[in-house]
Amino acid sequence: MATTNLSAYDKTTIPNASNYRFGIVVSEWNESITENLFQGAFDTLIDNGAKPENIIRWNVPGSFELIYGCKKMLETQKLDAVIAIGNIIQGETKHFDFICDGVTQGIKDLNLQFSIPTIYCVLTDFTVQQSIDRSGGKHGNKGVECAIAAIKMATLK
Ligand code: DLZ
């Protein structure tokens, strides 16, 4: 919903994350947005008990590369959950649709192929302002929401 604050959660309901290891793969495309998403996710993991040395960050050039980056992270690191962070903003061509579809399907496939959850922290917006609003702006920070999802899914695993 457009009015949802993505950062709102009840801390008393969130499991302690101190025993979990997290991977975060960050797309460099629209970097100012993805850095804010990363910061929101990282701070939330720490705030809920995760240790900094148990949070592994890798960068990839664009959102399309999140699929391979997450796959390699899942294969080579011992993790309880991975967060894929990206920001795709609509341009003048259909490129937006193809990248959104590819990334979404790719991350869905990773969730079927691996028994470690991959969390979808990809903003797919029509305007830069919509992305700003959801990466630490008036609708909160989707990175926070995705860190909470990662902790909950790590517990489920
Ligand atoms: C090429 C492209 C375009 C046009 N737009 C975005 C975008 O808004 N967000 C994003 O994360 N990446 C974009 N990319 C780059 C692709 O994700 C990818 O890096 C390149 O197509 C190379 O595979």
Image (cartoon, rainbow, N blue to C red):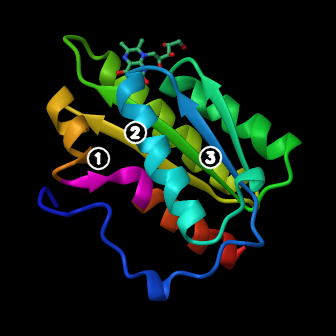
Is residue 143 placed above or below 96 in the rendered structure?
below
Q: Are marks 2 and 3 in contact (CB under 8 Å)?
A: no
- Quarter holding ligand 1: top left
Is 110 on the left-hand or right-hand side of 124?
Answer: right
Find numbered disc 2 in the image and state the secondary structure of the residue it sits on: helix
Tell me the residue that label 2 is attached to. Answer: 36
The earlier-in-sequence mark between 3 and 1 is: 3
Contact check, label 1 and label 2, Cβ < 8 Å: yes
Picture residue at 73% right of the left edge, 38% below the top: 71
Q: Earlier in the sequence, mark 2 or mark 3?
A: 2
Q: Which mark is residue 136?
A: 1
- Give the foreground label among 2 and 3: 2
Q: Amino acid at mark 1?
A: Gly
State the residue at coordinates (57%, 71%): 48
Residue 4 appears left or right of 94: left
Q: Dot 3 lies on which element? A: helix
Name which residue type carries label 2.
Asn
Left or right of 68? Residue 4 is left
Image quarter (top left, top right, bottom left or bottom right) of the N terminus: bottom left
Q: Which residue is mark 3?
A: 109
